[in-house]
Amino acid sequence: MNTADHTLRIDQFAAARKLRTPTWVYDIDTCRVIHANAAACALWHAKDEQDLKSRDMSEDMTATVATRLKQYQADFVAHDAVFTELWTLFPNGTPTTIKLQFSGFRLLDGRMAMQCEALGDTDQNPDNLRSTEALLHTDVMISLFGADGPALYMNPAARKVVLDANSTFREMFIRQSDHDMIADQLRDTGEHRLIAEVFTKNGNRWFDISAKKCDDAATGEPAVLVTAIDVTELKLTRDQARFLADRDQLTGCFNRSYLLDHIANLARKGARHIALMYFDVDRFKQINDTFGHVIGDKVLMELSDRAIARAQEGDIVVRLGGDEFVVVVNLDDPENCPTRAAQFFDDLSRPLDVGPDAISAKVSIGISVFDPVQTEIETALRQADIALYLAKNAGRNRFLFYDEKMGAEIEARKRIEAEIEVALSKRQFDLHYQPRLDVSTGTITAVEGLARWYHPSLGLVLPDDFIPICEDTGLIHALGRQVLEMGFYQAIEWHKAGLDLCLSLNISPRQFLGSDLMGTLKAYASRPDFPTHKIELEITERALIEDQEGAAVQLQAISDLGFKISIDDFGSGYSNLAYISRFPLNCLKIDRSFIGQWPSSGPIIRLILALAQQLDVNVVAEGVETQAQFDWLRDEGCAQIQGFLVGKPLSADELLPLLQEAGL
Ligand code: C2E
Ligand code: CA
Ligand code: CA
């Protein structure tokens, strides 16, 4: 600093001394007044300038005020700031509120001091005093914005964090949509509150912002009063908690409780076409059993990742549990649904690269489209589930849309399922027996036990109406056990009565693969009164095809116990001659559809007869209804005949006289 400058400063003080408004210069670093005019001395209740200069202003100063003054100092240096604020001073401990203007004042040694100038009179109104104090000391950020441009006013808390004091209200927001939302609401209702991310000196922060329309007290122009609190930590903690509460831990997908919230939200926002794409992994249990749970989990993670990758903005992927997922798709246009479904299906169907071998996990998808205002979410979920169920029933690895007809079908089915469970516990099932004739001797050598259901209101129900349902639901294990018990009981009775008769019983595929069967068979085979060699078990080709090695082992074990084995409905499915020859078989039962189609099916029947001869097993033609069929079969060398021509299935009581008549 040169002397000329120094002189200039002294002159400036001299001029200030003549002013009638209180003016003083405050050294922020030393907390001392270094100049004051007479009016300032009066304001500060000081005898003279010397008295005021001798005071240590830091004594009555709170830490917040000290920090704030440091901030001002920085603002003076940085952009020559000027602040106008209501302050409460405490000259000799008496609160005095006054509007002050602060500006920077460069000292001779280069440091920045603060020039303070009182604008207007002191205000002693206690309410004003208190509110002004509150405004200055609160941590709540308070700003007043005019229609456009930078803030008209910012309290110290706001100024402390604002990134740029010259920015407009809009420019504070990281997302313009947040500002637009506030602006819209201000227009409509005059106020709005939201949590938004804003630019601050401390980086991007989350503020809880309230905005209210008002008039600028000074000019009467329309303005917006904005109060804000930094809720970043709170929000992050809450987001984290919500993330955990809303997510499935394994896949990171949303969970069921979030699904309900999400759809309620979509409904509130006016969504009218929501698609639920309900999918699960075909034969997931088998994947788990074969490759282990770690690989099973990887399959689920990979599939959920793919669904998430295919999801568009506003779609969510939810794991309902196990291998069941739902993708919630908010459709702008319901016409798009088939395309979207096909995309999900294609993505999910690609081979998976998990584990040592690429696993071909396939999925099935059931889809319902609903209007959340008209239809309960639970109903829509059930509909998607029904469509999924039917997709599985139709052979899996496909997607299917729900329609009303499916609903009725499934309701009826559910009712039957429940009734079957009751029927099992009340033992409403019984066996009928259909005779099998030995062509060469003309005698009945065997009977086939066929399940019958005596339904309390429907009367007699035939197996085609309940066996497939039992097979699907797993009820077949319980039913199969009851059938074996009833049949075996009857066989023991016949054996005791000295009847030389074979009994064949049907074993369903699921029953054959289940663990129950061997236990039951072993238990009976070990009983001394049990005619094991008189029992034949009918197994369909379907049960043998999937795991031929396993089937061979199981059949051998059954055969080792002394039971006979026949293949039922032979020729109807997947005949694989290579494995048929390796099984310990007693008999092939020619599917009744071939007999029904005779004579056109004659060549096939001949082929099966020749095969049976080659394998050296018995052969039975099923479903023989006419004498012509019988004669032809006899002439072709078919050894045994079963069908309505010989006899319909009868109860044990009805059958007995027939057997006695035949001299058995
Ligand atoms: P299946 O094992 O092929 O049994 C023969 C079916 O053909 C029986 O029907 C029988 O009544 C019918 N049938 C016999 N002769 C003739 C004929 O000359 N013409 C015609 N049109 N049909 C004839 P049912 O009793 O309704 O049984 C249907 C199927 O249900 C059986 O076919 C079998 O697959 C299954 N089933 C029956 N009982 C049991 C059981 O206890 N356990 C298991 N797993 N399945 C069973
Ligand atoms: Ca059968
Ligand atoms: Ca059959």
Image: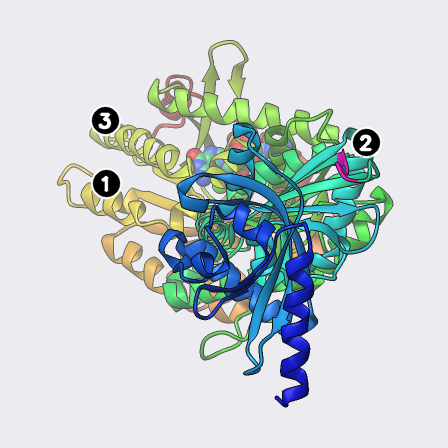
The disc label shown at residue 497, or none: 3
Three-letter amino acid code at disc 3?
Ala
Does residue 407 appear in the picture of this structure? yes
Where residue 188 is drawn, which disc sits there? 2
The disc, 3 or 2, on the residue closer to the chain's N-terminal end is 2
The boundaries of the magenta stretch are 214-218
Give the CA separation, mark 2 to mark 1. 90 Å
- How far across and how far down the image is residue 14, in percent? 65, 66
Q: Which residue lies furthest to the top in this view?
A: 457
Find disc 1 in the rendering and name its residue: 531
Q: Does the residue labelled 3 lie within 8 Å of ligand 1?
A: no
Q: Please, what is the dominant secondary structure of the magenta stretch?
A: loop
Could you tell me if residue 303 is visible in this image? no
Q: Which of marks 3 and 1 is nearer the N terminus?
A: 3
Q: In this view, does 463 lie to the left or right of 84?
A: left
Name the quadrant of the N terminus: bottom right
In the displayed structure, 380 sits above or below 177; it is above
Rendered location of residue 69, percent (x, y): 52, 61
Near-viewer residue (147 or 619) = 147
- Three-letter amino acid code at the position of disc 1: Pro
